[in-house]
Image (cartoon, rainbow, N blue to C red):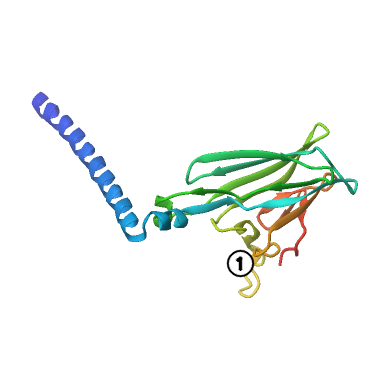
Amino acid sequence: MGSIFTRTAPLAIVRRVETHVVNFARLALLCLAVLGIFGCSEIQAMGKVVLFSPVSGIVLSNGKPVSGAVLKRHVFWRWGNKAYDDETTTDAAGRFAFPERSATMLLGSVLPHEPYIDQRITIEHGGKTYIAWESAKRGYALNDELIYMDMTDLDNPSGGGSMKTVGDPTKPITITCSLESPRKRVGEISGICQFDSASAR
């Protein structure tokens, strides 16, 4: 009995190592095949993902511009398991702007998966913190934040369960953030800010 267990255990370990080696080899071959088909420049273009579309706007308090307010943006990309943080400050006119936050990926371009990016923008002013933007981006294209599934009236084939947009996805995202406004949800986005473009449709 002792000799059987002694021989079986190392054999199981060897087989497990062989399995990992085979899987790694297959993955490497897949990468090489993709590179061979598309080329390096095409792969880089295909692998670009937009984690947070450009957002600009204005911060108001009692209808007046707020200068010096600090806006902090947090992004967590679940596929890449990476977090990104940046911040900006409103100018004398209360205006701010965040550039596009993007990344690149190779395997995600060819392997099926569900995009999911946690997004958050906070406003710090006067010793208080306000939630300006909180959402989950479920696509990698520019302005995907504005697209959402209408879950109301699901039993109505012509009304519920359809894709809708907040504003115009072909135009830059601009918002107005009033510090006195209550937090509301528009589509998949919740916060104190309102979209300057058309409302949800």
| Residue 112 makes an appearance in the image | no
Q: Quadrant of residue 16?
A: top left
Q: In the picture, which quadrant includes the C terminus?
A: bottom right
Q: Quadrant of residue 89?
A: top right
For residue 92, above or below residue 142? above
In the image, farthest residue toward the bottom: 158
Choose between 107 and 87: the one closer to the eye: 87
User: In the rendered view, does 11 fall on the left or right side of 74?
Assistant: left
Residue in the image at 62% along x and 46% along y: 119
Choose between 156 and 42: the one closer to the eye: 42
Q: Amino acid at mark 1?
A: Gly
Q: Bin the neighbour count of mark 1 within 10 Å (Cα to Cα): few under 14, some 14-19, many 20 and up.
A: some
The image shows residue 175 at horizontal and vertical percentages of 75, 54
Residue in the image at 71% along x and 48% along y: 97
Choose between 84 and 76: the one closer to the eye: 84
User: In the rendered view, does 110 fall on the left or right side of 87?
Assistant: left
| Residue 45 makes an appearance in the image | yes
User: In the rendered view, does 103 fall on the left or right side of 201?
Assistant: left
For residue 7, above or below residue 197? above
Residue in the image at 41% along x and 51% along y: 106
The image shows residue 37 at horizontal and vertical percentages of 33, 60
Give the labeled residue for mark 1: 161
The image shows residue 184 at horizontal and vertical percentages of 76, 51
Q: Which secondary structure, mark 1? A: loop
In the image, farthest residue toward the front: 41
Q: Quadrant of residue 42?
A: bottom left
The image shows residue 137 at horizontal and vertical percentages of 59, 52
For residue 179, above or below residue 160? above
Residue in the image at 15% along x and 34% along y: 11
Q: In the picture, which quadrant includes the N terminus?
A: top left
